[in-house]
Image: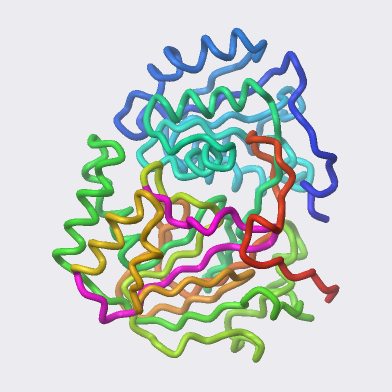
């Protein structure tokens, strides 16, 4: 069952009651002050009552939503960077009642460094690309308007047996290294990514691995669940076969094995100033896949990075940059490099993922998902 599809297009009630989870250490450490100054007055005017819970450590939000009585709340509001909503979604999927829990509407308020999901929602609502307090105000106004729309969810499996869910992206190579290495510059806010990118450009690396993907239009469900754990909780990923088996013959295997970066992205933005997917929001069940092959020059990478702020990087005619819309992928790494999932570190090992279409509800502009917003229509799921 796709939870979001089982629910009619809707809106939060008026008045409504929400649980706010806020990370006071996110970004420059001003999230709590920003909530009190910019968010609270708008919520009061819009008859949105709230309970504020301030997180105290990593995975605290995950623990809180695992134990929370969700029926008390009309929505869960997450104010932080993208890592906190990652915790919340995985906490909901950890619950015994995950099929019901994941239907609880979510709202992303930017309070961290990257704020990619909030920037994407801002874009879907038709607002201009903005940052900081302007982005926070726009996202709060969307919450006050109460409209909901379904969003895709990326289901990931690692060779160690870990299963987790992503609301935004999986990155490997340069993007992941910048995510991890720029943590030391957290006090700079979003500028930490610019500093980290220039450092990595100076010390440019290549990363070796095997990338394969299932493009739109080639999807045929596997007859074998990925592992027995899928039968115990979480949706079945019917396009995936076990990691110890080769990918099916109808998948595309990238012949090159040396990369600068690989990025699987569910939304349009990688931060509030990085319009990474100007081709638009994905249709249900589809994600953006980008990769840059080894051999690209530092100068070209710098051009791509600078052009990305306005979504013009695809116009640079870089022969090393490849984009394809896909429904599933597999990445098997050799040697160095880390994975970054929604900005959070994951150990380097073979990983594969499939998009679960329209699987969760987000406060947004309230539009129904439209395949016209994607370059191609998604495949229809065939029964296994």
In the rendered view, tell whether residue 130 sits above or below residue 376: above
Image height of 23 relative to 18, above or below: below
Residue found 75% across the figure and 16% down from its top: 14
Give the residue at x 53% y 72%.
Answer: 324
Residue 247: image location, x then y, percent: 61, 85
What is the x, y in percent for residue 48? 65, 15
Residue appearing at x 71%, y 49% in the figure = 369
Q: Give the residue displayed 70% in from the left and 30% down from the top.
A: 147
Count numbered badges in the picture: 0
In the image shown, does 232 or 105 lie closer to the viewer?
A: 105
The percent coordinates of residue 109 (x first, y second) are 50, 30
Q: Is residue 4 left or right of residue 118?
A: right
Quarter of the C terminus within the rendering: bottom right
The colouring scheme, among rainbow, by chain, secondary structure or one colour, is: rainbow
- Quarter residue 235 falls in: bottom right
Residue 289 within the magenta-colored segment of the rendering:
yes
If the image is split into quadrants, where does the N terminus sit? bottom right
Left-right relation of 279 to 284: left
Q: Looking at the picture, how far across and down is residue 195, in whole percent? A: 20, 49
In this view, the residue in front, 351 or 372, is: 372
- Tell me which corner region of the image, top left, top right, bottom left or bottom right, holds residue 197: bottom left
Of all residues shown, which one is farthest toward the left?
A: 202
The image quarter containing residue 306 is: bottom left
Residue 297 sits inside the magenta stretch: yes
Rendered position, 42 above or below 271 = above
What is the chief secondary structure element of the magenta stretch? loop
Q: What stretch is highlighted in magenta?
A: 274-298
């Amino acid at each position: 069952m796709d939870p979001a599809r089982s629910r009619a297009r809707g809106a939060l009630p008026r008045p409504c009651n929400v649980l706010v989870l806020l990370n006071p250490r996110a970004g420059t450490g001003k999230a709590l002050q920003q909530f009190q100054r910019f968010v609270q007055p708008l919520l009061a005017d819009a008859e949105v009552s709230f309970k504020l819970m301030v997180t105290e450590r990593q995975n605290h939000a995950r623990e809180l939503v695992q134990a929370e009585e969700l029926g008390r709340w009309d929505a869960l509001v997450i104010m932080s960077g993208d890592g906190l909503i990652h915790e919340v979604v995985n906490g909901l999927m950890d619950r015994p009642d995950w099929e019901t829990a994941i239907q609880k509407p979510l709202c992303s308020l930017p309070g961290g460094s990257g704020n990619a999901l909030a920037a994407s929602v801002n874009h879907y609502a038709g607002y201009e690309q903005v940052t900081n307090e302007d982005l926070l105000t726009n996202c709060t106004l969307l919450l006050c308007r109460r409209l909901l729309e379904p969003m895709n969810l990326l289901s990931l499996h690692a060779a160690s047996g870990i299963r987790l869910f992503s609301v935004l992206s999986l990155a490997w190579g340069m993007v992941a290294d910048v995510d991890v290495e720029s943590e030391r510059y957290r006090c700079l806010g979003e500028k930490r990514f610019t500093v980290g990118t220039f450092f990595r450009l100076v010390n440019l690396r290549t990363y070796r691995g095997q990338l394969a993907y299932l493009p739109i239009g080639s999807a045929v469900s596997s007859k074998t669940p990925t592992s027995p754990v899928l039968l115990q909780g979480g949706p079945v990923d019917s396009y995936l076969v076990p990691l110890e088996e080769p990918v099916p013959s109808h998948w595309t295997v990238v012949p090159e094995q040396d990369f600068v970066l690989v990025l699987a992205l569910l939304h349009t933005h990688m931060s509030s100033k990085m319009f990474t997917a100007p081709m638009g929001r994905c249709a249900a069940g589809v994600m953006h896949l980008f990769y840059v092959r080894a051999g690209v020059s530092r100068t070209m990478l710098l051009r791509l990075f600078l052009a990305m702020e306005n979504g013009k990087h695809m116009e640079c005619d870089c022969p090393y940059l490849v984009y394809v819309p896909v429904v599933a992928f597999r990445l098997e790494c050799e040697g160095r490099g880390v994975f970054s999932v929604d900005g959070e570190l994951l150990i380097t090992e073979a990983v594969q993922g499939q998009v679960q279409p329209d699987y969760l509800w987000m406060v947004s502009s309230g539009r129904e998902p439209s395949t016209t917003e994607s370059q191609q229509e998604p495949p229809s799921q065939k029964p296994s």
